């Protein structure tokens, strides 16, 4: 995604909310993604933590009752709109949380500041990932850890097949292709040590066409191509027919998280 499309896509939380809503309603794994991510954070009771690309702050809202009181949490996003939404969502719930607008490739923090850095589904948006990873390394303490979540190449495969059917002349590769479960480890290994991968098992069983149509509509600016109302109407009919015939529109998911150490 080019910077202009990225800025348009995430100028506020509307597009992201449409996508999160689909997963919340129809995921086959009853255990929430944000709870799963938090489960795998190996962080001491006293620590400084940075989330880069924090979005709306959902990781912290969903785990607000599990956060140690001695954690110092900083949330950063490149989008002022997202940062503002994160502040609105988390500040009333989590005392002393701090916020900033910044770029992952030039983090506005001193070296060896954080015990952990979290990058949840955002590194595939970064033009120079090695530079961003080097910044993460610089800002982590000697024994600090990185947690970087992303998708696999088969993630939402049935969705891309549907889009290719209606727009055969457009490349609808997953937005996470530059940094996926299949290629992310080698990228992280250039900078970090002890790189591991954790898999989150999940899928979608969609029983209502409208949320999936809203998800598709939210992708419009991501690919620099308008998804027309006529196409959306036809997609809604196609999805509804599948739901009526099979009981649900099934979509596979491939999701996970890399962990890596500085020391």
Image (cartoon, grey):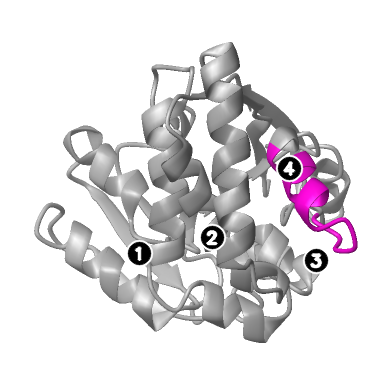
Q: Residue at x 64, y 86 (%)?
A: 4
CA gap, disc 1 to disc 4?
A: 39 Å
CA gap, disc 4 to disc 3?
A: 33 Å
51 drawn magenta = no
Q: Which labelled disc corresponds to residue 74?
A: 1
Query: Start and end of the magenta stretch?
Result: 159-172
Q: Compared to 19, does 10 lie above or below?
A: below
Query: Which comes before the other along the chain, label 3 or label 1?
Result: 1
Task: Name the residue beneath numbered marker 4.
Answer: 162
Q: Residue 230: in sight, yes or no?
A: yes
Q: Nearer the viewer, residue 71 or 202?
A: 202
Q: Residue 223 location in percent, x, y?
A: 71, 69
CA gap, disc 3 to disc 2?
A: 32 Å
Query: Which comes before the other along the chain, label 2 or label 4?
Result: 4
Where is residue 226, by image quadrant?
Answer: bottom right
For the residues bearing labels 1 and 4, Cβ distance under 8 angstroms: no
Q: How crowded is the residue under tag 3: few (<14 C-alpha within 10 Å), some, or many (20+)?
A: some
In front: mark 3 or mark 2? 2
> Which secondary structure lies at badge 2?
helix
Task: Judge from the rendering whether residue 152 lies leftward or rightward of residue 59; answer left or right.
Answer: right
Query: Which comes before the other along the chain, label 4 or label 3?
Result: 3
Q: Nearer the viewer, residue 97 or 208?
A: 208
Q: How crowded is the residue under tag 4: few (<14 C-alpha within 10 Å), some, or many (20+)?
A: some
Q: How crowded is the residue under tag 1: few (<14 C-alpha within 10 Å), some, or many (20+)?
A: some
Task: Name the residue beneath numbered marker 3.
Answer: 130
Q: Residue at x 66, y 77 (%)?
A: 105
Q: Residue 107: in sight, yes or no?
A: no
């Amino acid at each position: 995604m080019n910077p202009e499309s990225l800025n348009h896509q995430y100028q506020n939380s509307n597009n992201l909310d449409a996508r999160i809503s689909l997963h919340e309603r129809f995921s086959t794994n009853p255990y929430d993604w944000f709870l799963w991510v938090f489960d795998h954070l190996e962080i001491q009771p006293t620590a400084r933590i940075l989330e880069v690309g924090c979005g709306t702050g959902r990781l912290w809202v969903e785990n607000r009752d599990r956060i140690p009181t001695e954690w110092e949490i900083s949330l950063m996003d490149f989008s002022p709109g997202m940062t503002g939404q994160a502040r609105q969502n988390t500040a009333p719930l989590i005392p002393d949380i701090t916020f900033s607008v910044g770029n992952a490739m030039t983090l506005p923090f001193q070296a060896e500041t954080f015990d952990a850095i979290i990058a949840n589904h955002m590194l595939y948006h970064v033009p120079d990932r090695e530079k961003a990873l080097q910044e993460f390394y610089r800002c982590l303490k000697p024994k600090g850890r990185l947690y970087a979540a992303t998708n696999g190449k088969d993630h939402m495969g049935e969705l891309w097949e549907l889009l290719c059917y209606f727009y055969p002349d457009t490349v609808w590769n997953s937005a996470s292709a530059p940094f996926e479960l299949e290629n992310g480890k080698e990228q992280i290994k250039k900078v970090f040590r002890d790189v591991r991968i954790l898999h989150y098992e999940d899928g979608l069983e969609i029983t209502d066409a409208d949320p999936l149509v809203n998800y598709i509509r939210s992708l419009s600016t991501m690919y620099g191509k308008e998804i027309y109302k006529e196409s959306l109407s036809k997609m809604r009919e196609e999805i509804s027919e599948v739901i009526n015939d099979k009981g649900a529109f099934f979509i596979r998911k491939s999701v996970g998280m890399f962990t890596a150490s500085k020391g």
